[in-house]
Image (cartoon, helix red, strand yellow):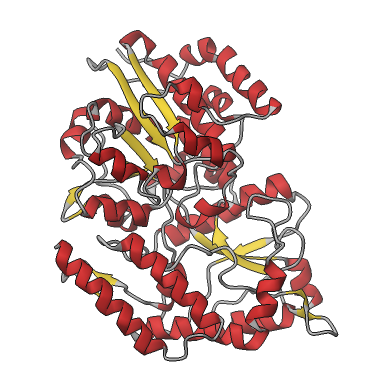
Amino acid sequence: MKRKLTAAIMAACMVTGLLAGCGDSAADSSGSTSGDTQTEAVQESTTTEAEVAPELSEKDKQAQEKVKMNIDELLANGLEIEDTDLTGEFSYWSAFTGDSAVWEQSRVDAFNELYADKGIKCNVQFVPDGAGVSNGKLLSAIAGRQAPDLIICDNATAAYSYAANGSFEMLQPYLDKVDLNVDNFFPGCKDVIYYKDEPYLIPQDTNVMLLYYNPDMVTEAGLDPETPPTTLDELDAWAEALTIQNDDGSYARFGLIPWLDLQTDAFTLPFFFGADVYDASTNTLNLTSPEMVACMEWFQSYGEKYDPERISSFTSGLGGMFSPDHAFMTGKVAMTITGNWFTGALRTYAPDVNYKVCAIPAPEGGRSNSTTFATNVFAIPQGSRNPELATLFIKFCMSGAVNEDNFAEWRSIPTSDAEFDNVSLTKNGDEIYALERELANSPDNGIPALCSVSTELAKAMVTFRESVIYGNTTDIVGELQKLQDKYQAELDKNN
């Protein structure tokens, strides 16, 4: 038999606020107030769930208490629960922090209650830095045979490098066991699912990248907020018109700081320029393409025009994305480039700020009206003792009922077009969500630079970008060639 749990009632399980829709470039901006305690929490892989739960505010505790009180009601309705012969406990490392960790705990609590009569239990631990992917903690756990049965990582590029290096289990037999089909996922999402034609990672949901702008500031600058920029030249002209410089040379407001909300994201903006960083068919990097060089020269032009030291001084005191002190929320920047999750942050921390969104402008020959897919990905580490239970949890997390509030709160999107029709934002005619759907269906979409050296290459490219912006690198092509030679050698070694 299958039991039902309604999406409407399941929403009560998500009352604590959702950041789960954020992946990749949002990871570093998510709430991290409990980061230190979380790091300590994973020192011993057998730590109990109670010991590793994130530190909650009084409001969050009340919200979780409300979830627990509604479990009986949840059981009486809606979502299909698998009639499985599986049983037992499994360990799960979640990358989520802050508000999203509270949501994650609610999701796990709901799963555990729903499968309690099967003897199934998920033991969650909150592990920062991409569930230990970005800081090597997961690799150490795998080597020491202490790895969890399942992780969710908020850095798909880094997770993919683990898959390419043999750190994750191939998922097909487990997907077959729980009847989870990924054939209808967006082609761009499939980039991260498959390594050498076999599935290793499963996107929980996905996100699109957008240009946010303040229409009031745009109007004041004599521009038309109803006709946002579509080309790079138009974007640069808007950035200049919206910038306000003080008499002493400092800045009261920037029109745009392109990398402001992409601090650790090396490949999104090169993607829109048309750069193809990696060719999987030949296992070849291409860091010296005209498109990549043009992107670096664009960064360089902003440094030269606006003075990198003044930009740095301006941004040093700004709050993160999930803070009321974020530059866009306080009116210190008129435009910013980030993902759909920022709509949720604006609703929470700056509900009175007027804003609009549009597709990210691209240069001629670039990827206009498209997006990179920023996604959180599930993976089963090598050595997992309960991969089938882990995959059952993945399927649970993919359901529309569980994700409805995630979509509604952060405008995250499903991994296939057909599922849009089941989302309340679509049914309610949300204009931003309609734009996201349009962008999600572009044939040019993808997740760039997915290869066995993704993590190291991304860090190197961020460092290189900073060097270009600050004027420390003038021979862009020559330095890119050095990076290419270095990491191509690593690729060849791993192949």
Q: Position of residue 425 (x, y in %)?
A: 56, 44
Residue at the bottom extreme?
475
Q: Position of residue 442 (x, y in %)?
A: 39, 64
The number of callouts visible is 0
Nearer to the camera, 205 or 427: 205
Left or right for 349, reference 281: right
- Picture quarter with the N terminus: top left
Which quadrant holds residue 334? bottom right
Q: Position of residue 291 (x, y in %)?
A: 38, 83
Which quadrant holds residue 131? top left
110 versus 282 height, above or below: above
Nearer to the camera, 380 or 171: 380
Q: Position of residue 473 (x, y in %)?
A: 47, 86
Left or right for 64, reference 388: right
Which residue is located at x 83 percent, y 81 percent? 246
Nearer to the camera, 393 or 149: 149
Question: Is residue 424 at least partly visible in the picture?
Answer: no
Which residue is located at x 39 percent, y 65 percent? 458
Left or right for 18, reference 185: right
